[in-house]
Amino acid sequence: MYQQTYDPLGNAFLSTIVAAIPILTLLYFIALHRRRDTQGNVHLGISAPYAAFFGVVAAFIISCLVFRMPVLTAISAFALGSLSGFLGIIWIVLAAMFLYTMSVVTGKFEIVKESIVHISFDRRLQCVLIAFSFGAIIEGTSGFGTPVAIAGAVMVGLGFKPFQSAVLNLLANTAPVAWGAIGTPIITLAAVSELDQVTLSTMAGHQLPFVSVLVPFWLVATFVKMEGGSWKQVFEVWPAMLCAGGSFALMQFYASGSTALHLMTDVVSGVFSVICTALFLRFVWQPKTRFLLRSEREALALASKSTATTTTESTTWKYSYSAAETAYAWMPWVILIACCALWGVPEFKKFLNNLFAGVTFSTTLLGSPLKGSLSLPVWDMPALHNLVQRMPPVVPVNAKAEAARFTINWLSAAGTGVFVAAVLSGLALRLSATQWKDAFMQTMRRMKIPVLVIAQVLGLGFLTRYSGTDAVLGLAFTGAGVLYPFFAAYLGWLGVFLTGSDTASNALFGSLQRITAQQLNLNPILIVATNSTGGVMGKMIDAQSIMVACAACYDDPKERSFALGPIFRTVFFHSIAGAAVIGVIAMLQAYVFPGMIPVPPAVK
């Protein structure tokens, strides 16, 4: 039995610094290491697979030498993270990219692009509609980086630069994350904290709508500045930004507190935002000037020998596809949403897990039991399952040893739902044998490096969890006293950065947040929910999400591999600021507006 220790050096400060070394190593090689290319130019950051590898090596050294974790236990923890990541995350992104690529090779994606452009020809509003509203729908159905991949690919297809598309979609994929993949983060948070699920969802819905209103403004400001525009051009489209963010926030506030809708909060909010914004732009308001990409402005200036801003009325755009052609082109995305929604229904998951319940087996793999039914095999990880003990104050006294099982839910996994959607879409689009092959090969080539990086980063996250280094970093926040509601957001933020998932962050720190809240006489509903809402701001800087964005937005493998550092440096301070906003909201709700904290049903 490996019992975690949270002060191996006998000095809390030094132990915290040492525990942070793997993360600091990863950050250094991602964003700060200086290198020269063949032309002698200096760049920051190295290739993503190597950066992840160095972080993993540092994690093994610290876990085994400083924290005295058995080597075999450390290897098993890393393997569990990589295996779980493949089934839980990589499988989703691979299937989603396969679906997208099929849409491209059949030419239907061109129709999708033009239909989006026809809603608004203004590039600022396209950012909001695609990255924020449409991305939220995808987040709500599948989560785990899928919205960054799909919405990012859509924006690149519309002419946005790969770097630009990646950054904007990472910024947009924040406020919806707490209800991603049919509410998986909230479900997990309720399970580990033993608090009411709907109450936690309601609490999150009393925090994130304030951010949802801000995100469209945040997106447009970032985009316009990237394109050399002015603050005046940012606020020229404030009515549409307010409509998109406000409609999303209102539905988010309502749905999050609904027993029937709380797990579908992102889907209904995203759909409501798209509809409201499209109707607003069609019947109520249009910007007086159309903001274009810098390259488009330069091309127009060259053609007309004028730098005057092109007005909406100065160019006529005719939509060249019928309603039937448009609906047909959008069919893969409708199928994707339907399949993901179906796979998110608990009863359907249970049905799939029990589909081959009559076909059972029992064997051993590497000396550890591998047994179960054909539809739900379970492998107890060797040298790890029930052999790691978390200690107080991270867990209650007499807590059970940490389970470490690789549950191979190959039928009920969200990625299987996305894959089924991809296959159905290919059949609906009538792909030829050559097109099936082209879509498959293009997806594999595009995802080769991202899969390697994601597997390493997820393995690192599990290693920090089972070694206890994550808990050491988390405990550093618990000494904040009355300021703890603010730092509770940063604890969730740290968890997402470490694991790449709001769900995993909630599993990691949900119990610790509740214990700390009770020790400090703070409302546990507020503090535990803040772990998830603060965590969403860490989503934009975790290596997994950035690599998914790179895979979707960059065609060139070399550019894709080296894009991680520049993207990380760009979004890092946005992430810090976003977590601070959640922290301030939590502080106000703790001490100024406690009436915003919902009361659990049992207490009522």
Image (cartoon, grey):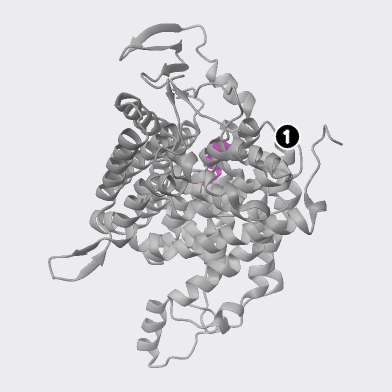
Number of labels in the image equals 1
Magenta region, main secondary structure: helix
Instruction: Tell me where residue 247 sits by quadrant.
Output: bottom right
Q: Is residue 214 magenta?
A: no
Rendered position, 76 above or below 181: above
Q: Amino acid at mark 1?
A: Asp
Residue 466 found in image quarter? top left
Q: Secondary structure at mark 1?
A: loop
Q: Is residue 441 visible?
A: no
Neighbourhood count class around disc 1 (C-alpha, 10 Å): few under 14, some 14–19, many 20 upward: some
Picture quadrant where residue 298 is located = bottom left
Q: Quadrant of the C terminus?
A: top right
Q: Report the residue marked by disc 1.
A: 196
- Give how far across and how far down residue 516 sits, in percent: 64, 41
395 sits to left or right of 149: right
**Could you tell whether 400 is left or right of 265 in the image?**
left
Q: Position of residue 243 (x, y in %)?
A: 69, 66
**Which span is picked out in magenta?**
333-341
Q: Is residue 437 visible?
A: yes
- Please name the residue shown 30% across and 35% down the image: 65
Picture coordinates of residue 93, whole percent (x, y): 42, 42
Residue 256 horizontal side relative to residue 184, left or right: right
Q: Residue furthest front?
A: 10
Q: Nearer the viewer, residue 118 or 472?
A: 472
Name above or below for residue 563 compared with residue 422.
below
Q: Is residue 161 above or below residue 201?
A: below
Q: Is residue 438 left or right of residue 249?
A: left
Direction right: furthest residue: 604
Question: Is 123 situated above or below 246?
Answer: below
Q: Nearer the viewer, residue 1 or 43?
A: 1
